[in-house]
Structure formats: structure tokens, C-alpha cells
Image: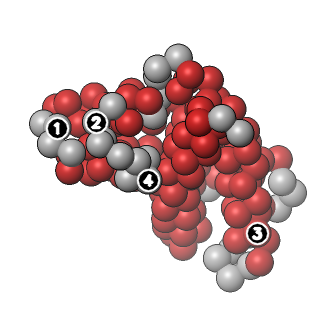
């Protein structure tokens, strides 16, 4: 496995963390509030982008970037990765029978969400690799770190 694949796996793992935080929080809020599928997906996607960007923003801010520069790097690094992950993840949940109707106490809720995120991870790794080999995506983050700090 060459360095670009290792970087892609690391970048996707980073993306998965932000997406999972946002997805879980969004689904929990929407399910507890009794919202429908559209509102559930909307808040989950919004929070997935928020937490995905926040993780990168925080990391590059620690490396000394200004707020504006850190925002630009986070947007450049994560937008495509989060978008692909969210399309795959939510697409799976929408076609999985009863997944969107499952309650917080149902095993189906947690199992379908975990499996959908795992599949999204597998689909997103080659996307991130393609971007990294072109100097895009998380390659932008690596330029602001002396060593790999989990990004």
C-alpha cells in the first residue's frame, strides 16, 4: 500500500469521525423529536458537515493558520469527502427497510446507521485518494502540519 492510500484511509477516518458525530446527533435529535425523514436527513447532514469541518478547522488552527485561512483549508479539505460520505450513508438508510422508522431503542436504528457509515467509509477512501494524488482534499491539510496529527 503506497502513501497515498494510507493518507486516504487516514483522511477518510477523520471524515468518518465528523460525519458520525453529526449523523448520530442529528438522528438522535430528529428521532427523539418525532421528525420525518426529510428533517432527520437535513439535520444529520448539516451536523455532519459542521463537525467534519470543525475537526479540520481546529487542527489547522493549532498549526497557526488564521481563522479565515483555516476555514478555507477545512472547506477545501473536507467538502467532497463529506458530501460523498453523506450521499452514500443516507442513501443506504433510505433504502434499508424500516431503518428510517426505527426508534432510538431499536437495534435496527444503531445497526443500520453503523453499517451505512462503514459502507460510506469504503466508498469514500478511493475518492479521497484520487483527490490527494492531485494535491486536493486532505493534501491541503497536510501542507499545514509538520507531521501527521491524525488528519
Q: Is mark 2 on a helix, strand or loop?
A: loop
**Camera-side mark, 2 or 3:** 2
Q: Are marks 4 and 1 in contact (CB under 8 Å)?
A: no
Residue 44 picture location, percent across and down: 52, 53
Q: Mark 2 points at which residue?
A: 144
Q: Name the residue under label 3.
A: 111
Q: Are marks 2 and 3 in contact (CB under 8 Å)?
A: no
The residues bearing labels 4 and 3 have C-alpha atoms spaced at a distance of 26 Å
Q: Is residue 74 above or below residue 119?
A: above
**Camera-side mark, 4 or 3:** 4
Q: Count numbered badges in the picture.
A: 4
Q: Do the residues labelled 3 and 1 touch (CB within 8 Å)?
A: no
Q: Is mark 3 on a helix, strand or loop?
A: helix
The residues bearing labels 1 and 2 have C-alpha atoms spaced at a distance of 8 Å
The residues bearing labels 2 and 3 have C-alpha atoms spaced at a distance of 37 Å
Q: Mark 1 points at which residue?
A: 65
Residue 129 picture location, percent across and down: 61, 30
Amino acid at each position: 500500500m503506497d502513501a497515498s492510500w494510507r493518507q486516504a484511509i487516514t483522511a477518510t477516518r477523520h471524515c468518518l469521525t465528523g460525519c458520525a458525530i453529526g449523523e448520530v446527533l442529528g438522528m438522535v435529535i430528529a428521532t427523539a423529536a418525532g421528525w420525518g425523514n426529510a428533517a432527520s436527513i437535513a439535520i444529520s447532514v448539516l451536523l455532519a458537515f459542521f463537525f467534519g469541518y470543525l475537526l479540520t478547522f481546529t487542527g489547522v488552527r493549532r498549526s497557526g493558520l488564521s481563522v479565515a485561512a483555516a476555514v478555507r483549508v477545512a472547506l477545501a479539505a473536507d467538502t467532497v469527502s463529506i458530501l460523498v460520505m453523506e450521499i452514500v450513508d443516507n442513501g443506504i438508510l433510505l433504502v434499508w427497510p424500516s431503518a428510517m422508522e426505527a426508534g432510538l431503542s431499536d437495534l435496527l436504528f444503531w445497526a443500520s446507521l453503523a453499517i451505512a457509515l462503514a459502507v460510506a467509509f469504503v466508498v469514500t477512501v478511493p475518492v479521497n485518494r484520487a483527490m490527494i494524488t492531485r494535491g486536493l482534499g486532505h493534501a491541503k491539510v497536510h501542507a499545514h502540519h509538520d507531521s501527521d496529527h491524525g488528519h
